[in-house]
Every structure is written in structure tokens, then in C-alpha cells.
Amino acid sequence: MSRTVMAVLGVILALYVVFGLVLPALFGLFKFLIVLALIAFVVVAAVTAVSKFTK
């Protein structure tokens, strides 16, 4: 009986860790990377445009 209860508690704790801690951290990391990529794209586009207009 206690083995079953501990297994259920382990599953509930594992689900909490996955959905409460790991997934939000991954989504936060992906949002950071997307913003960083957009900033890099704007910088590259601006440098390219300036270098083409100065010729």
C-alpha cells in the first residue's frame, strides 16, 4: 500500500517539476533566443543597408 502511495506521489512530483519548472524555463529561454535573433537581424540589416548606401 505504501509503495503505491509513494509511486503516485512520485508521479505527481515529477509532473509538477516538468510543468512547473522545466517547461517555463525552456519557454523563457526560447523567448530570449528569439529576441536576441531579432536584434541581430536588425543590426545586420542596418549595417548592410548603410554599407550599400555609402557606395
Image (cartoon, rainbow, N blue to C red):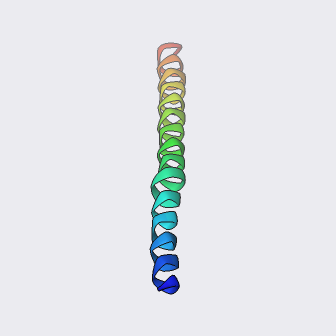
Q: How many marks?
A: 0
- What residue lies at 49% left-to-right and 46% top-to-bottom? 24
Q: x%, y% of residue 53?
A: 47, 14
- What residue lies at 52% left-to-right and 42% top-to-bottom? 28
Q: Nearer the viewer, residue 23 or 2?
A: 2
Q: x%, y% of residue 33?
A: 52, 41
| Residue found at the far top of this picture | 54
| Residue found at the far front of this picture | 1
Q: Which of 25 and 31 is in front in this view?
A: 25
Q: x%, y% of residue 47?
A: 54, 23
Q: x%, y% of residue 10?
A: 51, 72
Residue 32 position (above or below residue 53): below
- What residue lies at 54% left-to-right and 45% top-to-bottom? 29
Q: Nearer the viewer, residue 43 or 22?
A: 22
